[in-house]
Image (cartoon, rainbow, N blue to C red):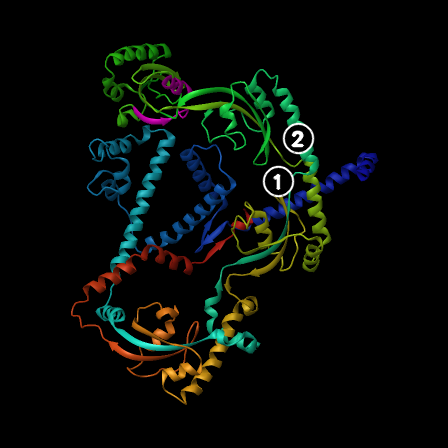
C-alpha cells in the first residue's frame, strides 16, 4: 500500500508512462499469442486441416442440441469437455473414413435414401420413431409429408431432420464399408483344421515347477547389460502415448475459526428475526442460500436432524438452527396435510392464443377456451367414458393421440400447480377444470393412493464458507510456498519440514480434464505439457480450482509419444529382468540334475517340489492346470513325444520340466464347416472396431487442441 501511495503522489506524466508500459506489455503478449495461434491449426489429420472456427461451430451445435434434449440452460464444464472430446473424435473419424469411402467409391444414392425413408428396406431409425402404436405399422406417409414439406418446417425442425438424414446416410455408408470387409474375410480349410486340432487334440502330462520365489532377490545382481539385453529384445512392447507425471501440494480453502464465529452470529441473528417475520417466503429468499420451496414432503425427505421431529410439530412451529452437511439450517412449519403420494387422471387440454406452447394455428381466446371446457365438463360429468374419444379429436396435448388423454399415475406435485391442486382437492370420479400456463384442462380424476402425512417447511440454509480474507490468506500461503521453493529439492524438503501432504498424478494425458481429486484441471495439464516446462520444474504460478483449492506442482516425468527410452522405464523392468536372470540360474541347476536322473519324481525331490498331473490339456488352453497362464509351457508340451522329458522351460512363474504321458488325437473330420463358421464369426465381430483402430494408428494426426483449451 505504501508503494501505491507514493505513485499517487507522483506527477501525471509518470502515471501515463506506466500505463503505456503496461499496455505495451499486454499488447506484446497478445500479439505473441495471436501469432502462435495463427501458425497452428487446431489439428491436421492426414494432411487435412481442422480449423478452430470449424471445430467450435460443431461443438456449439452439439452443446445446443444436448441442452435442448436435456432441457438445461447450461452445461457443466465437465459436460462441455466431454462434448469437445466427442466432436474431436468424430471429426478425426469423418476425415479418415471419408478417405476410405472415397478410395473404394462407396456412396449412397438418392434412391437408397428414399428406400430407407419410406421404401421396402426401412432404416431402423424410421422403424423405431415412426411406428404407429395402434397398428404397429410404420407411418410412411408421415415421413413423406415431412420430406415434401421440408421448406415449411420451423428452422429448428429443419436442423433436426437434416441431422436425421446425415445420421442415416453415414450409418448406411459405414454398414456398406464394414460389410465389404466382413464378407471378404476367408478362412482356409487348412487353418480351420489346425484350429480344430488345437481345440480337440489332448495330452495327459506330469510336470514339476521350480518357482522363481525359491531364489532370493538378494542372490541376483543386475547390471546395465542385463537391462539393455531385455530392453532390446522387448523394445516394441514399450510404445507409449505422450504423458506426464506431477507431484503437487494442495492448499484447500476451508473456513477459518473467524468464519465459523461470523456465520454462527449471522445464524443467531436470522433466527431471532425469524420469530417475528410475517412474509416467510420473502424472508427465506432474502436470508437463505437456497430459495423458498413450497413443496410438501413426506417422512424421510427432510434433513436427518429434524426428519422425525418435524412430523410431530404443528403449523407455525419454529425449528431452531442445526447443522446439516456443512451448513446451518433452521425453519418454520408452514402447513401439515394428509396428501396422496400418487394420483391418476385423464384430461383434455383446450389451449388458446398466447398460451405456452400453443400451436400457431390456434386463434381462440381464453374466454372461448373456458366456454368449450365448461361444455365438455358438463358432457363428461354425465358420461366420463367419452373422454378418450374427445381427447383424440379435440385435445391440444400432442400426446393425446397416443394416450387418449390418460396421464396414468403421477407423483404428487409433479404436475403444474393448478392441475395438481385440482386433482388433489377433488374426489375420484370427479370431472373438473383448471387453468394453467398451457390452457384450460378438463380433468377426470381416476385414482389416488392412501393419503400420507406431509409437511410444508420453510427451510433457511446458511452455508459455512470461507470468507474473502480466508481465501486471500490461503492463497498467500500457497504463493509463499511456490516462491520459496523454486527447485524440486527445495519443494521436497519443504514438504517434509512443514508436514504437508504431497500428492501424485501419473500418466496424465495431453487432453486430460482432471487429476485425482481435482476436476477441471486443464490449466495444470497445459502447464505440464508446455514446451517451456522441463522435468523437475516447479510451477511459478499457483493454480486455483473452483475457489476451493490452490495447487503448487512439480513436473516429475516427461514421456513423449513413441518407444520409451530405457532410462525412463528401468525401474519398472527390475522385476522381469531379475525374473529372467533367476530363470537362467534355475535352468542351470535343473540341467545339472537332469544329467544325474531322468526320473521326474527324483528330479522334483531334489528341488523339494511336487509333481502335478494335468489330465487334459489342449493347445488352445489358457492355463496349465493350477499354474495359471503359461503359453511357453503349452507350446513346448505339444512338441514332445509320449514318455519324453522336456528340457527346462522358462515360464511366467517358474522353470518347468514336463513329461507327456499320453497324446489323444482328435477324431478325423471330413467337414470343418462349423469350425470355419465359428472362426469367421469371431473375426467378423471385430471388424467394426479393429479396422478403424488400424486406420487411426497408421494415420498422421497432429492434435494441437492443448494450445486452445
Q: Is residue 665 visible?
A: yes
Residue 336 relative to residue 483: left or right: left
667 over 388 or under it: above or below: below
Magenta-tinted stretch: 406-424
155 over 239 or under it: above or below: above
- Give whichever of 232, 283 is nearer the camera: 283
Q: Which badge, 1 or 2, comes first in the chain's sequence? A: 2
Q: x%, y% of residue 682? A: 28, 60
What residue sits 36% from the left and 54% below the top? 99
Single out the residue that lies furthest toward the left: 670
| Circle 1 SS class | loop
User: Is-magenta flag for residue 571?
Assistant: no
Q: Residues within 10 Å of mark 2 (few under 14, many from 20)?
A: some
Q: Which residue is mark 2?
A: 264
Q: CA distance from mark 1 to mark 2?
A: 22 Å
Q: Quadrant of residue 520?
A: top right
Q: Which residue is mark 1?
A: 547
333 over 627 or under it: above or below: above
Q: Mark 1, mark 2: which one is toward the viewer?
A: 2
- Verify CB contact (< 8 Å) between mark 1 and mark 2: no
What residue sits 44% from the left and 72% below the top? 653
Q: Residues within 10 Å of mark 1 (few under 14, many from 20)?
A: few
| Circle 2 SS class | helix
What is the number of the mark on residue 186? none
What residue sits 29% from the left and 83% below the top? 643
Amino acid at each position: 500500500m505504501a508503494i501505491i501511495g507514493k505513485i499517487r503522489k507522483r506527477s501525471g506524466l509518470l502515471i501515463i508512462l506506466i500505463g503505456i508500459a503496461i499496455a505495451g506489455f499486454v499488447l506484446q503478449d497478445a500479439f505473441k499469442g495471436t501469432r502462435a495461434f495463427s501458425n497452428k491449426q487446431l489439428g491436421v489429420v492426414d494432411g487435412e486441416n481442422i480449423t478452430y472456427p470449424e471445430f467450435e461451430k460443431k461443438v456449439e451445435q452439439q452443446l445446443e442440441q444436448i441442452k435442448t434434449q436435456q432441457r438445461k440452460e447450461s452445461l457443466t464444464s465437465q459436460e462441455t469437455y466431454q462434448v469437445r472430446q466427442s466432436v474431436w473424435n468424430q471429426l478425426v473419424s469423418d476425415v479418415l473414413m471419408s478417405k476410405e469411402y472415397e478410395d473404394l467409391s462407396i456412396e449412397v444414392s438418392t434412391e437408397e435414401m428414399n428406400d430407407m425413408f419410406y421404401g421396402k428396406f426401412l432404416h431402423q431409425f424410421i422403424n423405431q420413431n415412426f411406428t404407429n402404436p395402434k397398428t404397429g405399422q410404420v407411418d410412411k406417409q408421415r415421413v413423406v409429408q415431412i420430406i415434401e414439406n421440408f421448406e415449411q418446417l420451423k428452422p429448428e425442425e429443419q436442423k433436426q431432420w437434416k441431422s436425421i438424414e446425415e445420421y442415416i446416410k453415414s450409418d448406411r455408408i459405414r454398414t456398406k464399408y464394414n460389410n465389404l470387409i466382413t464378407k471378404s474375410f476367408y478362412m482356409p480349410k487348412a487353418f480351420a483344421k489346425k484350429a480344430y486340432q488345437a481345440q480337440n487334440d489332448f495330452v495327459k502330462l506330469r510336470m514339476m515347477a521350480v518357482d522363481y520365489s525359491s531364489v532370493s532377490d538378494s542372490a541376483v545382481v543386475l547390471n546395465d547389460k542385463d537391462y539393455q539385453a531385455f530392453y532390446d529384445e522387448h523394445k516394441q512392447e514399450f510404445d507409449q502415448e505422450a504423458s506426464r507425471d506431477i507431484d503437487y501440494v494442495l492448499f484447500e480453502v476451508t473456513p477459518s475459526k473467524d468464519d465459523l464465529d461470523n456465520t454462527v452470529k449471522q445464524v443467531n441473528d436470522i433466527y431471532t428475526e425469524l420469530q417475528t417475520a410475517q412474509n416467510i417466503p420473502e424472508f427465506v429468499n432474502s436470508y437463505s442460500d437456497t430459495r423458498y420451496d413450497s413443496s410438501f414432503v413426506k417422512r424421510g425427505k427432510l434433513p436427518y436432524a429434524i426428519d422425525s421431529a418435524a412430523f410431530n410439530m404443528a403449523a407455525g412451529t419454529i425449528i431452531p438452527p442445526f447443522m446439516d452437511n456443512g451448513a446451518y439450517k433452521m425453519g418454520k412449519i408452514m402447513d401439515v396435510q394428509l396428501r396422496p403420494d400418487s394420483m391418476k387422471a385423464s384430461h383434455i387440454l383446450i389451449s388458446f392464443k398466447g398460451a405456452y406452447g400453443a400451436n400457431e394455428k390456434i386463434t381462440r381466446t381464453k374466454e372461448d377456451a373456458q366456454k368449450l371446457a365448461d361444455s365438455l365438463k358438463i358432457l363428461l360429468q354425465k358420461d366420463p367414458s367419452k373422454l378418450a374419444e374427445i381427447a383424440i379429436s379435440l385435445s391440444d396435448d400432442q400426446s393425446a393421440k397416443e394416450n387418449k388423454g390418460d396421464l396414468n399415475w403421477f407423483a404428487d406435485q409433479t404436475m403444474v400447480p393448478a392441475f395438481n391442486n385440482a386433482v388433489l382437492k377433488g374426489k375420484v370420479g370427479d370431472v373438473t377444470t383448471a387453468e394453467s400456463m398451457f390452457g384450460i384442462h378438463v380433468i377426470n380424476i381416476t385414482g389416488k393412493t392412501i393419503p400420507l402425512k406431509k409437511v410444508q417447511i420453510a427451510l433457511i440454509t446458511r452455508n459455512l464458507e470461507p470468507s474473502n480474507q480466508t481465501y486471500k490468506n490461503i492463497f498467500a500461503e500457497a504463493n509463499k510456498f511456490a516462491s520459496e521453493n523454486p527447485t524440486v529439492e527445495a519443494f521436497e524438503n519443504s514438504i517434509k519440514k512443514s508436514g504437508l501432504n504431497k500428492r501424485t498424478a501419473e500418466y496424465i494425458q495431453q487432453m486430460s480434464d482432471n487429476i485425482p481429486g481435482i476436476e477441471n484441471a486443464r490449466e495444470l495439464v497445459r502447464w505440464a505439457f508446455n514446451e517451456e516446462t522441463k522435468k523437475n520444474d516447479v510451477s511459478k504460478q499457483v493454480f486455483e480450482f473452483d475457489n476451493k483449492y490452490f495447487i503448487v506442482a512439480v513436473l516429475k516425468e516427461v514421456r513423449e509419444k513413441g518407444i520409451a527410452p530405457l532410462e525412463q522405464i528401468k525401474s519398472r523392468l527390475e522385476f522381469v529382468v531379475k525374473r529372467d536372470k533367476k530363470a537362467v540360474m534355475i535352468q542351470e541347476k535343473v540341467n545339472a540334475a537332469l544329467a544325474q536322473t531322468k526320473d521326474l519324481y527324483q528330479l522334483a525331490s531334489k528341488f523339494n517340489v511336487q509333481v502335478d498331473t494335468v489330465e487334459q490339456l489342449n493347445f488352445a488352453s489358457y492355463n496349465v492346470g493350477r499354474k495359471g497362464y503359461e503359453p511357453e509351457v503349452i507350446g513346448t508340451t505339444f512338441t514332445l513325444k509320449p514318455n519324453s522329458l522336456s528340457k527346462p522351460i522358462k515360464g511366467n512363474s517358474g522353470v518347468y520340466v514336463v513329461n507327456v504321458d499320453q497324446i489323444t488325437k482328435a477324431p478325423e473330420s471330413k467337414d470343418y464347416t462349423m469350425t470355419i463358421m465359428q472362426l469367421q464369426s469371431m473375426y467378423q465381430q471385430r471388424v467394426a472396431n479393429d479396422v478403424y483402430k488400424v486406420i487411426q494408428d497408421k494415420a498422421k494426426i497432429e492434435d494441437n487442441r492443448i494450445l486452445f483449451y
